[in-house]
Image (cartoon, coloured by chain):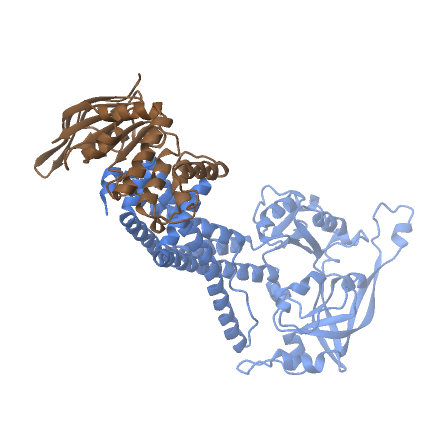
Amino acid sequence: MTTAIRTEDVCRHYAMGESLIRAVDGVSIEVPAGEFVALLGSSGSGKSSLLNLIAGLDRPTSGSVIVEGKDLAKLSREQLSGHRLHTVGMVFQSFNLIHNMTVIENVELPLRFAEVDRGERAGIARAALQRVGLAKRLNHRPSELSGGEQQRTALARALINRPKLLLADEPTGNLDSHTGTEIMNLIREFNESLGMTVVMVTHERALAEQYVERMIFLADGKLVDDQANAAAVVSRVQGGRA
Amino acid sequence: MKAYDLAELAIRNLRESVLRNSLTTVGISVGVASLVAMLSLGIGLQQMATRRLVRSGLFDTVVVTSRRDLRNFNRGEDAENAPDPAQSPVLDEPARQKLEHLPNVVEAYPDLRFITSFTFEDKPHLTMVAGIPSSYKTNDAFEGLQGSFFSSDTASEIILQKTFAADLLGKTQKPGREETPVTELAKPLLGREMTMRYAERVDTAAGAERADAGPGDAANYSIQSHELKLRIVGVTDLDPDSMRGTARARVLLPLKLVQSLHVVQPNAMRDTTQAASNVPTYSTVSVRVKNPAKIQSVEDAVKKLGFNTFSILDATRSMRRFFTVLDLFLGIFGSLALAVASIGIVNTLVMAILERRREIGILKAIGASDIDVKKLFFAEAGVMGAFGGALGVALGWAIGRVINLGTNIYLRRQDMAPEQIWFVPWWLVGSAVAFAIVVSLLSGLYPAARAARLDPVQALRYE
């Protein structure tokens, strides 16, 4: 199985006044392609910082982050934006949709940066929105949608450029449990049907146990545990047989 | 990102803060309007001056004389290089036709003038007469003409200069006395007839018929006295012939009529060539050029033919220099408002970056590059510049028009003819809009660079 993500002794330190914040401190992990992984830990444990490093939104202070064979620390700013555009798709706790754009325009946005022709864009965006069950909400503004619908829009946007990795930062954090389950089911579906590698940040262990194959625990920026989630694997195998 | 996507996103973003962006755009338009208004007035004034000068006939005319005429205007010039006067060409009708066919020449007409006597109400009056071509109709000097210009090139009609008209009516202006208005002088004279006595040169065939006569050997001619009745059709206020100084004519006749009269010219007796030929020769020929800028090339071409020339070219050069400096100053003053407006653009865009910090973070998170973000802010500045520029040109055009209107109302009250002192050429429209866009883009440089440099992680944390 090929490796999708590999971090080697990666550190991300911030200077805050005279003190040094070690957000990520010497973490080494390896995620095979197609795996569904959760980064778990309490607030300030460094899980979102590690996700940002994998997304190419931030650069490590030391160590290396290798995603799909590319060492992100060695990429230029322009190459990093290309990585965010084509290799990874991101969803956030606060959805991060552009409020003055409609649902379909939000989903189309990464296609504009990828310089896809105007004529092709609408079709691709419609198909993505259909996949997340929002075919009837194309021309609504984010403010007219429920939280679950906004997160579905964000998911459609994250998948529009067919990335190999889906990075989700607390994707159900702002949703009720029922809507959260719907979103998690969608994410699992993408992981299984598209073979996407998914890295999800969450502080809800129960949620992680229900969906992910592997749980990586962080505390104070350090890796404290890395375990396979047997229950999820079993349910997955059973689901596959059914 | 493709250009149309960029423009679409820029316009969408500008619509989000309509009031602020509109005020910034109005700021740019005021700047452009002041620039356009100033320059359009400068250009208008320059055109008015050029038009006046061209219509005066002084700046688009080259006066050509023969080198045989030793009284030439610029005898000293090129004296060393010039051929011997006795061997230089004669300024005759074939030479005039040759001059007329030179490039950039509109017409070449001979200067026919003579002193003769007129009889009006049985009283004789002696004065200088000149033949003028029909192209003089548009001459500035005829702007205040009372009556009308000649009905045709050969009509037995006459236009009087104001001072001669006053002489005819016995109202000769005396020092210290108020001048009689031209309208009053014209009233009793227009339509009246006066008789001109003139001396016609009649070539006799005897010389040519002699057995030993050489080619052109028509030295025999006689002079016959004639009378011609002429109808007064106009009285001019200004003097179209003023550059002639003491030789200026006070009575004007159609040129072709004068040519058909074969009046003996003052140079006929002096010029040996004229004495030996029945081909008319001229003391001077006026060559009218397409526009003052072509004067030099025409002068050079005429000199190559072996004639002397004279023009008031240097005066137009100084005038052009003056207007270039004037336009420069007007442009600088006009641009000051645009400079102030550019600060407004910087302010608006910096505010937009602060407000849209999170949005910039989102754009970067989903794949926008630094260049995409930079281009987006650039496009917003450019769109404001384009709209502001277009609006400014319209506003500047309107301001210039109002100033023109106001000036003309004032001129009319002063009994002066209305003038077009404002002109907006197409190049100014294009340049003003382009200038507004360039200034806006330059103003957008700093905000765009600042937006592009934003750290996406920090920007996404911003609420």
Is residue B411 visible to the viewer in this orientation of the structure? yes
Q: Is residue B119 left or right of residue B301?
A: right
**Count of picture labels:** 0
Q: Which chain is brown?
A: A
Q: Residue at x 55, y 53 (%)?
A: B313
Q: Is residue B356 left or right of residue B128?
A: left
Please name whichever residue, B317 or B227, is drawn nearer the observer in this view of the structure.
B317
Please name whichever residue, A125 or B50, is drawn nearer the observer in this view of the structure.
A125
- Outermost residue, top side: A1
- In this rendering, the answer to whether A102 lies above or below A53 is below
Q: Which chain is blue?
A: B
- Quadrant location of residue A216? top left
Q: Residue at x 24, y 31 (%)?
A: A210
- Outermost residue, left side: A18
Please name whichever residue, A214 or A63, is drawn nearer the observer in this view of the structure.
A214
Q: Is residue B393 left or right of residue A177?
A: right
Please name whichever residue, B267 or A148, is drawn nearer the observer in this view of the structure.
A148
Q: What quarter of the picture does the N terminus of chain B occupy?
A: top left
- x and y percentages locating residue B279 in the rendered image: 80, 52
- x and y percentages locating residue A87 in the rendered image: 34, 28
Q: Residue at x 58, y 45 (%)?
A: B78
- x and y percentages locating residue B456 in the rendered image: 26, 38
- Quadrant location of residue B164? bottom right
- In this rendering, the answer to whether B376 lies above or below B247 is above
Is residue B66 visible to the viewer in this orientation of the structure? no
- Quadrant location of residue A31? top left
- x and y percentages locating residue B445 in the rendered image: 33, 44
